[in-house]
Image (cartoon, rainbow, N blue to C red):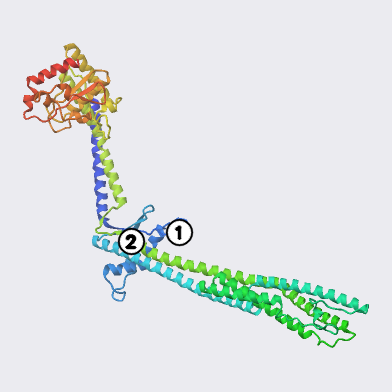
């Protein structure tokens, strides 16, 4: 043991030398750390959450920080911090701007979109002013650039809108001019009218060909051709029967029906115009139908005039009357052939007109879609401009004071020196531990040999645990840490106490000490838990009325409202104040209310009788 102690002393001497060297290094690095000491001012900026199609826009923190470090923002912040109205009064040095840029740092939180701007300077007041001024200058620069972008975008969109409106107006003009030149009101209706006229003229031509064939055959046989009232040659005068009245197209039955339809259509159109506007589809359809009917009757009138003009003047009845009828029929046939050719030409031109109208309609539809898209873009830009003006970066916490900056290299060196300096005490700690163990061994020998007391065991004081459990407190290591060294020591003490009690024919024992805070309550609580876990009926009675430490009830998670005071002073049976715990074999009687005189409670006969009763009950 003596040789071990001498070696330990040599180690401690060498440790002292190393400790002095480390202490010197600690002082040197601490001096350098103080020399490099500066102040840090922090400003918190809330960045905007700009929405896009794919979700929230990703704020590029590095790009925004480069904007904050730009010369324009730094110069603007210096003007605000130094209260300069312009650069003519005081010229801002470029080195000053570069120095400020080097002392700027940032931290960014992408979840909360918060931007932490840091500025370091040896002057505390100057650091606060510059940090706040840079944040304000950045927000002003952000706002001005955003307004410029939105203004330019709106200006460009307005120019596109004007060009699109001009192009659309030109296309509509060309479309209207084409329809006016081709006399197109409704292409489908015109086509239907032409088809109807073509069919009608073809039928009339077939009838004329049949009449001509009959007249020619009768002429070959020298027979007189007598036209029917429905025939085209019926208008020729006859010697035998007199001249037949000439048939007029205007007064025919078909013209009468057309005039009736025109009159009805005009009445319906007038009624619709009273009820709807001129652009209503019903009004447009009725107007188109009226135009078709008017064109139809005009066309028939012109046809009748053409036939009347082309027909030869009737001559008195002569032997060659059949020749006159045949000539009249051929003249009318030629007129119908001409009309049929005109209808065929117009019908053949229908696909071309339709394709041209379709091209005009497609072009106008495209231009209208483009104009609609431009208008939507303009509206969206205006809404976005309003939203962005409400969603600008803002200072959520300005810098009110600067904190001391830490020089990390010098601090690390100083901390390393301090760590090594403290580690040098490890040898001394081991030596002290050996001394304590030696002292404990000597103490056990003195207690056992000199005082003739048997040492039942010892428990080293450990680190307190810190957790919550509904059954027992964290200090009850005999319950929570059954395999720990302290639990085993408590088990050893319990077994030794049980052996002593068996020999002395007693079942109750007490724990006490001369000084407070020596661990009596914790030891008693853990011995009770150890005994109950061993299968013994155990009762823990708390007589400690001191308030320097928690009662046993707090360790056992039990009530401390009733206890010994109620048994002795209130003469309450102990069964009524008996408290159960999380272990079935473990019961507790707490102190209860604080009595006027603790000594009288403990030394009263009622207390002795109580101890006798519980000894018999839990024996």
In the rendered image, which quarter is residue 493 located in? Answer: top left
Give the labeled residue for mark 1: 52
Question: Measured along the vertical axis of the image, is residue 487 above or below residue 500?
Answer: below
Residue 465 position in % (x across, y down): 26, 33
Q: Nearer the viewer, residue 420 or 71?
A: 71
**Other residues around mark 2 within 10 Å, as few (<14) / some (14–19) / many (≥20):** some
Question: Measured along the vertical axis of the image, is residue 136 above or below residue 595?
Answer: below
Extreme-right residue of the structure: 221
Q: Which image quadrant: the C terminus?
A: top left
In the rendered image, which quarter is residue 443 located in? Answer: top left
Residue 449 position in % (x across, y down): 15, 17
Mark 1 vs mark 2, foreground winner is 1
Residue 268 position in % (x across, y down): 57, 73
Is any atom of residue 450 visible in this view? no
Q: Secondary structure at mark 1?
A: strand
Q: Determine the residue positioned at 9% across, 25% down.
A: 570
Q: Is residue 281 left or right of residue 43?
A: right
**Other residues around mark 1 within 10 Å, as few (<14) / some (14–19) / many (≥20):** few
Q: Is residue 309 left or right of residue 494?
A: right
Q: Determine the residue positioned at 24% across, 39% down.
A: 17
Q: Nearer the viewer, residue 111 or 210?
A: 210
Label annotation for residue 394:
2
Q: Nearer the viewer, residue 36 or 545?
A: 545
In the rendered image, which quarter is residue 255 located in? Answer: bottom right
């Amino acid at each position: 043991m003596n040789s071990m102690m001498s070696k330990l002393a040599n180690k401690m001497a060498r440790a002292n030398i190393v400790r002095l060297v480390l202490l010197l290094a600690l002082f040197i690095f601490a001096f350098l750390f103080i020399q490099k000491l500066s102040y840090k001012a922090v400003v918190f900026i809330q960045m905007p959450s700009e929405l896009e199609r794919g979700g929230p826009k990703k704020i590029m923190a590095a790009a925004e920080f480069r904007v904050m470090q730009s010369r324009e923002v730094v110069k603007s912040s210096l003007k605000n911090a130094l209260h300069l109205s312009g650069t003519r009064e005081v010229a801002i040095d470029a080195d000053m701007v570069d120095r400020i840029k080097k002392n700027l740092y940032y931290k960014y939180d992408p979840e909360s979109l918060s931007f932490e701007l840091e500025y370091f300077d040896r002057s505390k007041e100057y650091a606060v002013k510059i940090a706040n001024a840079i944040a304000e200058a950045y927000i002003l620069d952000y706002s001005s650039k955003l307004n410029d972008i939105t203004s330019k975008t709106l200006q460009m969109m307005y120019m596109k809108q004007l060009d699109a409106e001009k192009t659309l107006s030109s296309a509509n003009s060309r479309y209207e001019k084409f329809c006016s030149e081709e006399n197109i009101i409704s292409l489908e209706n015109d086509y239907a009218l032409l088809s109807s006229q073509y069919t009608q003229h073809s039928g009339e031509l077939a009838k004329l060909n049949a009449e001509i064939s009959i007249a020619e055959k009768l002429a070959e046989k020298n027979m007189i051709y007598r036209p029917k009232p429905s025939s085209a040659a019926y208008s020729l005068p006859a010697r035998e029967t007199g001249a037949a009245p000439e048939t007029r197209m205007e007064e025919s039955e078909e013209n009468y029906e057309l005039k009736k339809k025109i009159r009805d259509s005009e009445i319906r159109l007038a009624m619709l115009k009273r009820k709807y506007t001129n652009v209503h589809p019903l009004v447009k359809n009725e107007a188109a139908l009226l135009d078709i009917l008017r064109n139809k009757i005009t066309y028939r009138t012109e046809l009748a005039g053409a036939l009347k003009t082309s027909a030869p003047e009737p001559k008195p009845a002569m032997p060659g009357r059949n020749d006159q009828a045949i000539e009249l029929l051929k003249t009318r046939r030629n007129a119908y052939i001409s009309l049929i050719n005109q209808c065929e030409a117009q019908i053949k031109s229908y696909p071309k007109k339709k394709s041209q109208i379709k091209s005009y309609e497609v072009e106008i539809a495209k231009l209208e879609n483009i104009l609609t898209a431009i208008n939507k873009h303009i509206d969206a830009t205006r809404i976005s401009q309003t939203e962005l003006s409400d969603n600008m970066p803002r200072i959520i916490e300005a810098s009110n004071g600067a904190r001391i900056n830490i020089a990390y290299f010098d601090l690390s060196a100083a901390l390393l020196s301090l760590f090594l300096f403290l580690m040098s005490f490890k040898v001394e700690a081991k030596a002290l531990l050996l001394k304590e163990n030696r002292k404990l061994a000597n103490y056990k020998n003195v207690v056992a040999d000199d005082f003739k007391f048997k040492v039942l065991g010892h428990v080293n004081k450990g680190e307190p645990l810190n957790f919550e459990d509904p059954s027992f407190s964290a200090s009850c290591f005999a319950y929570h840490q059954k395999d720990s060294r302290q639990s085993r020591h408590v088990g050893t003490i319990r077994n030794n106490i049980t052996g002593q009690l068996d020999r002395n024919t007693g079942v109750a024992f007490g724990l006490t000490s001369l000084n407070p805070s020596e661990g009596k309550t914790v030891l008693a609580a853990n011995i009770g838990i150890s005994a109950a876990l061993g299968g013994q009926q155990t009762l823990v009675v708390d007589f400690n009325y001191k308030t320097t430490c928690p009662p046993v009830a707090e360790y056992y998670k039990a009530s401390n409202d009733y206890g010994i005071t109620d048994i002795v002073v209130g003469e309450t049976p102990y069964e009524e104040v008996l408290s159960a715990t999380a272990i079935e074999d473990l019961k507790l009687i707490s102190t209860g209310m604080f009595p006027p005189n603790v000594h009288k409670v403990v030394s009263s006969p009622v207390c002795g009788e109580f101890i006798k009763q519980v000894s018999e009950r839990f024996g």
